[in-house]
Amino acid sequence: MPTATGTLSSPALTCGPVDAPAPGANKDLPRMDEIELNDGTADRFLLDAPGLSLVVFHSRTCANCKVAREQLPKMDLGVQRLCWIDAGDNGGLVQRYEVFHLPAMFVVRDGVYYGAVAASLQMWDIRRQIALALDSYPATLP
């Protein structure tokens, strides 16, 4: 739940340990689109967005989230866009996506939800988990 300071008040939502910066991040890659979404814009955008979106829940106070914000755009993840959602300001999406740790990543392709990406902040691991998610049964957006 958002508070007056914009931080999370729920003790169940925690920030994971900080990993080292992601090796394999390629600075020569063209930047993928980065979109800021919120409770009011996420559903319509994700339903209409063509191609592959990686939805990333983050918090301004989470050290691992700061690393993710720096490193994910530099990685060759095979996605068209990164969709950033501030968990502290968007409690409705946090509840619907059942976010319990940060950063939390989810795959959406052509308006269809494929599930969570449980990976370290390493390019090879994220790519593998995205591929596994896309091999699963699709569902409607949470």
Image (tube, rainbow, N blue to C red):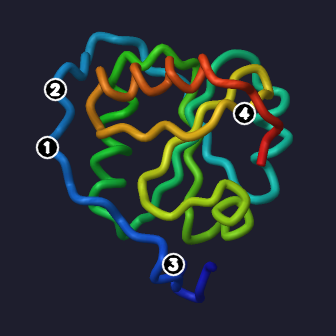
Tell me: residue 3, above or below residue 111.
Answer: below
Can residue 53 be seen here? The reply is: yes
| Residue 8: numbered disc | 3
- Whether residues under marks 4 and 2 lie with C-beta atoms below 8 angstroms apart, the answer is no
Work out which residue is located at the far bottom of the displayed protein and give it.
4
Instruction: Tell me where residue 82 appears, x and y as whole percent.
Output: 54, 33
What whole-number distance in Å separates the C-alpha atoms at marks 2 and 1? 8 Å
Using the rendered image of the protein, determine whether residue 34 is visible from the camera's viewpoint.
Answer: no
For residue 20, which numbered disc appears in the image?
Answer: 1
Q: Earlier in the sequence, mark 4 or mark 3?
A: 3
10 Å crowding of disc 2: few (<14), some (14-19), many (20+)? few
Callout 1: few (<14), some (14-19), or many (20+) C-alpha neighbours within 10 Å?
A: few
Quickly name the residue at label 2.
23
Quarter in which the N terminus is drawn: bottom right
Earlier in the chain: of badge 4 and badge 2, it is 2
**What is the spatial separation of the Cα atoms under label 4 and label 1, in whole angstroms?**
29 Å
